[in-house]
Structures are given as C-alpha cells and as structure tokens.
Image (cartoon, helix red, strand yellow):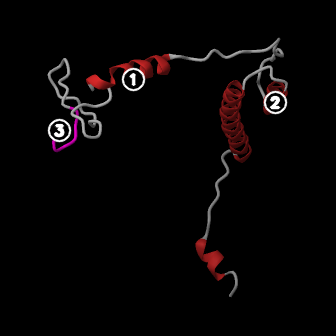
Amino acid sequence: MDKDNKCNHILDNGERCKAFALKEKDYCFSHDPESREEKALAVRKGGLVKPIRINGELAVIQEIETPEDITKVLGQTIREVREGKIPPQMANTIGFLSGHFLRAYEVIETERKIDQIEAVLGDRKFTYDSNKRRNKGR
C-alpha cells in the first residue's frame, strides 16, 4: 500500500488511477480483484432505471401561456398525484419546470413594464439638485 493511499492500478493510458485505495488495500473499489463481483453488481444496479408508470389517462394540458395556466397545471398535477395517476417524481419535474416558467414570465413582464414607463417618460429630462434637498429643512 502506498503512502498517499491512492489506487495502484495503471490505466490504459499509462497513468495511475487517481482514486483512493480501499482501507488496507492497494486498489480502489473499481480495481480491487477481490471486489470484482461487488463492482459488477453495483454497475448493474446503477444502470437500472425504473420505468415511470402512469395509471390511467392524464388530463390534457392546453397551451401554457400565463401564470393562471400554470396554476391550473399544478392543481391538476396535485390531483393526479393524490389519485395515484402519476408518480411524485413526475410531479416534481412539473413543479420544477413551472417555477422556471414563472420566473421567465416575471422577467418578461418586468421588461414590458419598464418599456411602458420609458414610453410615458419619453424624452423628459430629470435633474436632481442635491443642494436643494440638503437645505430643505433649514
């Protein structure tokens, strides 16, 4: 076992593996000959993806254009989770994307309001006299 506690396996490119060796071993989990079966099981287990099951028909979602539309989608999503029609993971994704939609909507609305204010103000020039403000109470 090396002093730096790094795996002693030499990779195909000639470099030493940079992972830490297992306790009291010369190799990391991936390269330890005694851990081969465990590693194969971990690789298989990590590669398995559980399919998302949808029970029944989902409600048709119309075009989403306003925060009110998002409110309807979220309400429907809550009902479908509670009724067991969709899994919570799907509901989390819908909630996450809804949050991004609402933030983007807020930015667009703020920019629209700024444009309206600028149009009203037009070419008006505003000056600020700091002396007038300071001497106001005297």
Please tell me which of labels 1 and 3 falls first in the chain: 3
Residue at 66%, 38% in the rendered image:
107
Label disc, if present, on residue 124 of the rendered structure:
none
Q: Which residue is mark 2?
A: 78
2 in magenta: yes
Secondary element at image label 1: helix
Please tell me which of labels 1 and 2 falls first in the chain: 1
Q: Quadrant of residue 72?
A: top right
| Quarter of the picture holding the C terminus | bottom right
| Residue closer to the observer: 64 or 7 | 7
Residue 54 visible to an observer of this rendering: yes
The residue mark sitting in front, 1 or 2, is 1
Label disc, if present, on residue 38 of the rendered structure:
1
Amino acid bearing label 1 = Glu
Residue at 19%, 43% in the rendered image:
4
Prevailing secondary structure class for the magenta stretch in the rendered image:
loop
Secondary element at image label 2: helix
